[in-house]
Amino acid sequence: IYRVSALWIQNSKSEILLAQRSFNKKNNPGKWGPAVAGTIDEGESYESNIIKEAEEEIGLKNHHFQKSFHNFNNGEHKHFTQWFFAKMDDENFKIQKEEVERIKWFSKEELNSLVKEDSPELIKSLKDFIKNDFN
């Protein structure tokens, strides 16, 4: 069991920014997940991790992320996730190719449709989040 921080970014049109994981990733390669997510290293806090990961993965610097809820994922990869929230429009995102293939804004309708179809394009923990907590 490990710990993860994840960032949910929404813009002024209520669209959600998702990141497609690099195809070279060990877990869930090429699948869409939160805009930013990272495993917490020993001695690191959820807060310090999300700040570090946001800068590394999509180039966000000097942003305040609102702490949201904490949940446990009991799937194949068991982990606690601390979710953070940010509201922003297009930034000068710079993706880290080792971690992120691409990013895209999704409408709430698009996301709900992907969840309803049980799309293999989304990581399971994101589907669970959208199903249980997003609506």
Image (tube, rainbow, N blue to C red):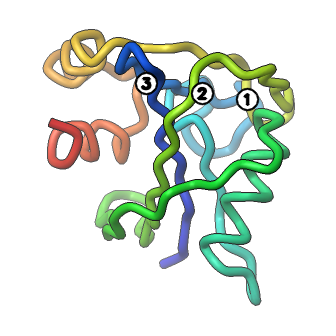
Report x, y in % for residue 35.
58, 35
Q: Residue at x 31, y 68 (%)?
A: 71
- Amino acid type of the residue that numbered disc 3 sits on in the rendered structure: Ile
Few, some or many residues within 10 Å of mark 2 (<14, 14–19, 20+): many
Report x, y in % for residue 70.
35, 69
Does residue 35 sit above or below 113 in this rendering? below
Front position in the image: 47 or 87 = 87
**Disc nearest the viewer among 3 and 1:** 3
Cα separation, mark 3 vs mark 1, equals: 16 Å
Residue 74 occupies quadrant = bottom left
Q: Residue at x 36, y 47 (%)?
A: 125
Q: Residue at x 72, y 22 (%)?
A: 91
Cα separation, mark 1 vs mark 2, equals: 6 Å
Residue that mark 2 sits on = 19
Q: Secondary structure at mark 3?
A: strand
Report x, y in % for residue 37.
60, 50
Residue that mark 3 sits on = 16
Do callouts 3 and 2 mark residues in contact (Cβ within 8 Å)? Answer: no
